[in-house]
Amino acid sequence: MRFLPHRYAAMFFTTLGQLVAGRDDLAGRRAALAALGRMYRRFGLQSYHDTAIAAALVDTVCRFAGTAWEPQSTARWERGCRRALRLVERAAGAIGDGPQVTVGEVETCVAAADGVAVVTVRPMRRVRFRPGQALPVGTPRLPGVWRWYSPANAPRPDGTLEFHVRAVPQGVVSPLLVGKVAPGELLWLGPPAEVGLSVAAAGGADLLLAAGGTGLAPLRAMVEEVAASPGGRRVTLVVGARSLLACYDAVALDKLQDAHRDWLTIVPAFSADGDVEPAARGDLLTVARYHHRPGQAFYVCGPPALMEAARVRLPAAGVAAADLHLAVTFRRPLDSARWLAGQRPPRQPEPEPAPEPTPQRDAGRGGSGRSARS
């Protein structure tokens, strides 16, 4: 279509088609809306484009559906497309301006542990992001389906992004990224989004970071951010895994510890490994709570079950609500509301009202003022 660059047309229409079909889960739909919303805004789409967009999408789906297409399908898809476009328009308004959707080339895809891969991507356009943020990531192997992944690094001079991906049982994107995607392939990268993890939110406080599984990625990026701007802040990173073999990022963590021993402490927590030292045994939240000190900013990131447990256990254990920062999972309405609020640009202060004009007094016959009747 003439108002969408050719490079992004397939990305836009396959994602919109998935949204209309409603086949994805809540987190996937949020990722798709973030990507669509930024394209909608970036390419200047308006509500009067809906007719052309719906017609193009319905025609494409009809041609590929073949004999499965029924007479009533056209009207149903047109209505669904218009409803989806209203959601996209709202998402565009919520996330505002910023980095556009882009394409990246996979440089390396390394098996780091059983079912876990470290994928390094070089974007065609540098992605402007802050450590702790997450990006929608998609693959042309499954066009239109997106998942959230956080870079495991602070911004690098060469612009590359490192993603930690665990193949989720019954997942559709993660198994492809772990077992199929190879160097030289392209990935789709959506706009970075705040998900509740930000060093700036801690002010000048020390940090306690609790990472479960590949939830380590954004927290490791936050450690790199502190390393790039040292300011006397102390950081404790508790890394949870079932066993020593499941601790997939051990080499990178050892390098971080060696380079920053004066302010960084990395603590392992193995929940199901009887061969490690007793001090390293225990579930992640229990070990992290042991290292918690009043005034620390306490961050937690990991699988949804961990986040639900942290939401209940940590406040009950005395962690102040103001000090607790839990990563958004998009699986709860509260998470979605927090995410939308975090994407809105900061409100500009309203201008103060102009002062009322002061009436000029009549300066008399010889003066320059004018009387009220003049």
Image: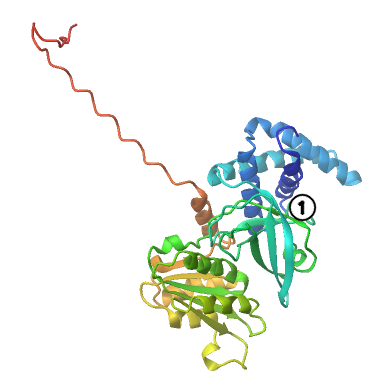
Q: In front: 125, or 57?
A: 125
Can residue 189 be seen?
A: yes
Residue 98 in the figure: left or right of residue 263: right
The image's colouring method is: rainbow
Q: Which residue is mark 1?
A: 143
Q: Can you give x and y, in whole percent of width and height, for residue 217 in the image?
A: 59, 68
Q: Residue at x 56, y 78 (%)?
A: 239
Q: Can you give x and y, in whole percent of width and height, for residue 50 in the image?
A: 68, 34
Q: Residue at x 55, y 70 (%)?
A: 220
Residue 352 in the figure: left or right of residue 151: left
Image quarter (top left, top right, bottom left or bottom right) of the N terminus: top right
Label 1 Cα crowd, 10 Å radius (few <14 / some 14-19 / many 20+): some
> For the residue labelled by badge 1, is the local secondary structure a helix, a strand or a loop?
loop
Vertical placement of residue 188 versus 323, above or below: above
Residue 207 in the figure: left or right of residue 305: left
The three-letter code of the residue at mark 1 reads Pro
Q: In front: 235, or 167?
A: 235
Q: Residue at x 57, y 77 (%)?
A: 255
Q: Can you give x and y, in whole percent of width and height, for residue 302 in the image?
A: 58, 70
